[in-house]
Amino acid sequence: MYFWVFQSINAIAFGSLLFMIASGFSLIFGLMDIVNLTHAIFYMMGSYIGYTVFVHTGSFFLAIITAGVVVSLIGGLKYRFFLQNLHGKPLNQVLLCLGFLFVFDDLLLIIFGGDSLIIDIPDMLRGATTIGNIYFPNYRLFLILMGLVLIIILHFLIEKTKIGSLIRAGVDDEEMVRAMGININRIFLLVYILGIFLAAMGGVFGGVILGMQPRMAFSVLPLALVVVIIGGKGNIKGAYFGSIVVAFLDNFGRALFPELSYFTLFLPMVLILTFKPEGLFGKSNS
């Protein structure tokens, strides 16, 4: 009983972390139709910048804000000067994003070296909470809470605000939005920066439990892709529940069938692509 409850809590906490990454990835893919393969490197970049700020200041909050702002600025410049001119050219987008992925990954290796690093748990989140005979690490409970807060904020932003209505309109019919005289390029840039900020924030949170090591972006990227495929692109609710599903599959797959962990993770993706390619929460094109 302890095993199942503890692993479930770990899975939900990991799912909340995945949601920070995949929500932005899903919005960028859904609204802008850009498979932003550089997204995972922004997570990795956020981890390293957050680690540096935390080591020098001791402030976890400042680490999150600094990482989010710096990485968002880098991502925004990348979009403004490179990706913005490639709308409707998916092959060019993929090649460009892959190029940036390898370039940024090598730069991080040069700057921070090849040693594995980890962000210390903030003092206020150390320890564990006891429920019955089971101990739950406070930091993982905090991640679960952050995931719930984030989905509420994003749901309110997308569903209840004017900018959210423009974002949803852009997802459904970009040409009509342009015909109404709305500067969709600014909305694209806003969504792109928001997605990058979420990835960088996730990098700081993830640096505490997953640490940082060279090439880790290449292990994060497939998980984000699976989340979007399962949940459906451009769908916040789908990104959240897709993240939880992927986290459970990954966590229990590694715990129960370590030799088949990739099989248990990617088989559901294959089935969804076959029978419901728009994702569990995505809109059908038919």
Image (cartoon, rainbow, N blue to C red):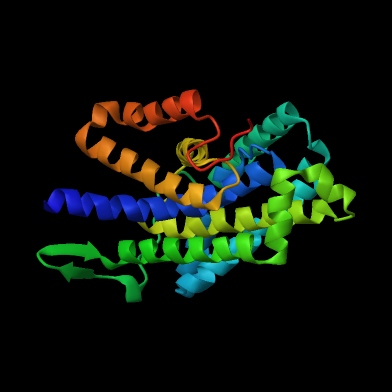
Residue at figure coordinates x 66%, y 38% from the top left: 100
Indicate the position of residue 275 as horizontal and vertical percent values.
47, 25
Left or right of 186 on screen, residue 172: left
Q: Residue at x 40, y 29 (%)?
A: 266
Residue lying at the far front in this picture: please name it: 286
Between 165 and 19, which is closer to the camera in this rendering?
165
Q: Residue furthest top?
A: 274
Q: Position of residue 244 (x, y in %)?
A: 38, 48
Is residue 265 rendered to the left or right of residue 6?
right
Q: Is residue 61 visible?
A: yes
Residue 55 picture location, percent across and down: 46, 67
Q: Is residue 284 above or below residue 53?
A: above
Identify the residue at horizontal 62%, vertical 53% (top origin).
196
The C terminus is located in which quarter?
top right
Q: Residue at x 72, y 26 (%)?
A: 91
Question: Foreground: 274 or 269?
Answer: 274
Q: How many marks?
A: 0
Q: Toward which corner of the image does residue 66 lie, by quadrant?
A: bottom right
Residue 107 is left or right of residue 85, and the answer is: left
